[in-house]
Image (cartoon, grey):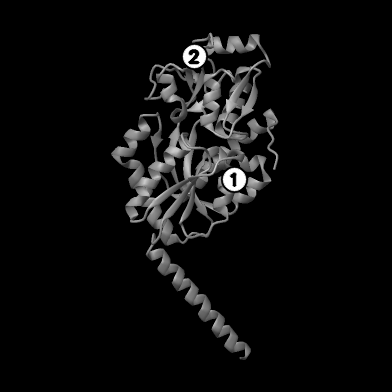
């Protein structure tokens, strides 16, 4: 075959692959979908994953939630980044995974280059929580207690570079307290140790702690948002008490391997919007203080860039590092 013949053959093959890809996208989904939650069951990530799974199931295929915890979410993200870009394996990510971890980890930065945003899913207020047995009842009393005992107590987080970690470091910088981080593989094991007073405090999202606050096992002293949470309206904000202007909010979003066909994105985004706006999801997530939301991929890119700039200074000042 001459050079011209080879060019025609390759052009035909490329066209065929393109048509095949378009046809597959048009019939999406034609097999089960997997949503990877990169933290243990029971936390906010898992709650979002199961809400989204139920909504995407309306497209006609089963949707499985796969919890792959570890390394502050990097293990799950890395797994998804290596999957085919066909929309059948996706990742539920917390904001810290994409606005904080790429600043700390070359591995996560590399993973981030291989995935792309689909939609924001919601926003979570976080609470300053302490064990019910700790002899403090207000945020000012907590600060006084810690300032009298510098460097003596640890705070819990769901891993290095997670929202619980950087929120606490921002809180430490603003409040002038000295507590050291104790890292866990997720919120659930951290909360168990917090209740047992193995750590003295945490800044944790509603889904992981609200039931324990309401049962009296934990005390919520403040919320990190600029407005009080509807779930706990009697809990003051940090801004109105000891740290004027303080705000730290976790958002969650759906990501997919880079290169997912646009036709697939065009099916996912409106279905996610419908799911997160549904009465059932609003009631379920609202009960734990979560504000469901949705967005375009472009809006998610913008939000992520803004957050990255916000946390870069906190990381530098706190000298946070993550071993790759």
| Residue labelled with disc 2 | 132
In primary-sequence order, the first of circles 2 and 1 is 1
Element on which disc 2 rests? loop
Residue most extreme to the bottom: 1
Query: Residue 317's spot in the image, x, y percent?
Result: 68, 29
> Quick one: 223 or 64, which is closer to the camera?
64
Left or right: where 293 falls relative to 39: left
Query: Residue 246's spot in the image, x, y percent?
Result: 53, 24
Residue 90 against residue 72 in the figure, above or below:
below
Residue 11 against residue 84 in the figure, above or below:
below
Query: Residue 192's spot in the image, x, y percent?
Result: 52, 25
Q: Residue at image x 64%, y 8%?
A: 148
Residue 115 against residue 95 in the figure, above or below:
below
Say if residue 227 shows up in the picture: no
| Residue labelled with disc 1 | 75
Residue 75: quarter of image: top right
Q: Residue at image x 51%, y 21%?
A: 128
Say if residue 127 shows up in the picture: yes
């Amino acid at each position: 075959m001459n050079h011209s013949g080879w060019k025609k053959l390759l052009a035909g093959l490329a066209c065929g692959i393109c048509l095949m890809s378009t046809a597959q996208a048009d019939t999406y989904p034609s097999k089960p979908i997997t949503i990877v939650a990169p933290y243990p069951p029971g936390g906010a990530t898992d709650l979002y994953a199961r809400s989204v799974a139920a909504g995407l199931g309306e497209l006609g295929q089963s949707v499985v939630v796969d919890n792959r915890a570890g390394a502050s979410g990097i293990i799950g993200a890395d797994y998804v980044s290596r999957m085919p870009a066909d929309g059948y394996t996706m990742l539920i990510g917390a904001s810290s995974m994409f606005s904080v971890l790429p600043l700390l980890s070359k591995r996560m930065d590399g993973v981030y280059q291989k995935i792309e945003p689909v939609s924001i899913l919601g926003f979570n207020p976080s609470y300053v929580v302490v064990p019910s047995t700790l002899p403090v009842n207000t945020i000012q009393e907590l600060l006084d207690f810690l300032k009298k005992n510098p460097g003596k107590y640890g705070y819990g987080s769901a891993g290095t570079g997670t929202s619980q970690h950087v929120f606490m470091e921002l809180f430490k910088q603003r409040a002038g307290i000295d507590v050291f981080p104790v890292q866990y593989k997720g919120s659930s094991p951290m909360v168990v140790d917090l209740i047992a007073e193995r750590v003295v405090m945490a800044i944790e999202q509603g889904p992981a702690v609200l039931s324990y606050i309401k049962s009296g096992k934990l005390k919520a002293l403040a919320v990190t948002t600029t407005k009080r949470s509807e779930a706990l309206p009697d809990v003051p904000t940090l801004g109105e008490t000891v740290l004027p202007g303080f705000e730290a909010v976790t958002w969650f979003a759906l990501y997919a391997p880079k290169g997912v066909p646009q036709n697939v994105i065009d099916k996912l985004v409106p279905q996610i919007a419908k799911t997160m706006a549904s009465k059932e999801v609003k009631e379920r997530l609202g009960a734990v203080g979560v504000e469901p939301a949705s967005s375009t991929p472009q809006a998610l890119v913008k939000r992520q860039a803004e957050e990255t700039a916000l946390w870069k200074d906190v990381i530098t000042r706190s000298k946070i590092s993550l071993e790759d």
